[in-house]
Amino acid sequence: MNDLIMIVIRFLLYLDLMVIFGLPFFQIYGISGVRHETYNLTNFRSFITFAVVTGIILTGINMLLVSNAMSGVTDLRELSIHIIEMVIEETDVGISWIVRLCALFTTLGALFLYTNKRVLSCLLMTMSGGVALATLAWGGHAVMHDGLHYYLHLLSDLTHLGAAGTWTGALVAFAILLMRRNAHNAQSVIVISDSLAKFATAGTVIVVALILSALVNYLYIAEGNLTPLFNSSWGGILLA
């Protein structure tokens, strides 16, 4: 049961951090320079705020579950403050947890600039959100290597996360734009059309980055063996 909970929390954390990074990033390249009269239409502040608060909560829950798994206790109620402190202070997972929380609170602070200095706010949120998202790769598959291969695998992981976050943020942004009450008026149509045009180029770059980074990750994890890629159901899913 704990394993299932861990998987669900981990999935939600990935999804949430991708939105936190991707949504303000989309406002920089996809909606930057949009007409001022469409301010309310392209105001994503409430959605980003919700995502950041959710990210902080999920990060806390994830740390409790990780501490529980690393300590070997069978019940979360058996966890002591000492065990949690030890995990935070003495493991890479704990360090990444601290960095992630700092990045999320920085993102939360940048939201206060959103009303009057939106571009600056989105730039700060993109950077801090990117740091928060990058912490997920801290304990990823790259740790299985040493030296140069560690950094190459880590770079591939970071590229994959960044591309996935950019794609997810754009999808969420378009969903928000289309669900607005005034989504079918003239101004809304113009904004959405302009944003789609700007995303066309970005989308191509994202897909290429996802494919290349996924290929590098696979080669590292499978140690260069391409056979499972063609002879397994999971390989078929990856190729699809």
Image (cartoon, rainbow, N blue to C red):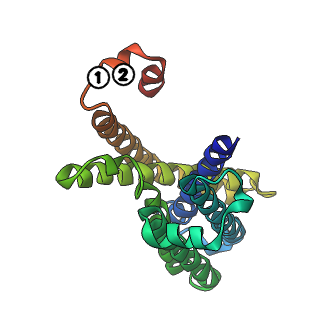
Q: Is residue 209 rendered to the left or right of residue 93? A: left
Nearer to us in this view, 157 or 144: 144
Q: Quadrant of residue 176?
A: bottom right
Query: Identity of the amino acid at label 2?
Result: Leu
Q: Quadrant of residue 62?
A: bottom right
Q: Position of residue 26 (x, y in %)?
A: 52, 60
Judged from the image, the secondary structure of the residue bearing numbered disc 2 is helix
Judged from the image, the secondary structure of the residue bearing numbered disc 1 is loop
Nearer to us in this view, 96 or 27: 96
Position of 153 relative to 236 (above/below): below
Which label is found at residue 226? 1
Do the residues bearing badges 1 and 2 touch, measured as CB atoms within 8 Å?
yes
The furthest residue to the left: 148
Nearer to us in this view, 171 or 138: 138
Q: Position of residue 227 (x, y in %)?
A: 31, 18
Position of 135 relative to 103 (above/below): above
Q: Position of residue 178 (x, y in %)?
A: 71, 51
Mark 1 vs mark 2, CA separation in Å? 5 Å
The structure residue drawn at horizontal position 22% and vertical position 52%, both measured from the top left corner, is 146
Visible residue check, residue 32: no
**Quarter of the image containing the N terminus?**
top right
The structure residue drawn at horizontal position 43% and vertical position 61%, both measured from the top left corner, is 134
Q: Quadrant of residue 195?
A: bottom right
Visible residue check, residue 220: yes
Which label is found at residue 183? none
Query: Identity of the amino acid at label 1?
Result: Leu
CA neighbours of label 2 inside 10 A, class few (<14), some (14 to 19), many (20+): some
Position of 206 relative to 81 (above/below): above
Q: Position of residue 56 (x, y in %)?
A: 64, 68
Position of 143 relative to 42 (above/below): above
Which label is found at residue 229? 2
The structure residue drawn at horizontal position 60% and vertical position 47%, both measured from the top left corner, is 11
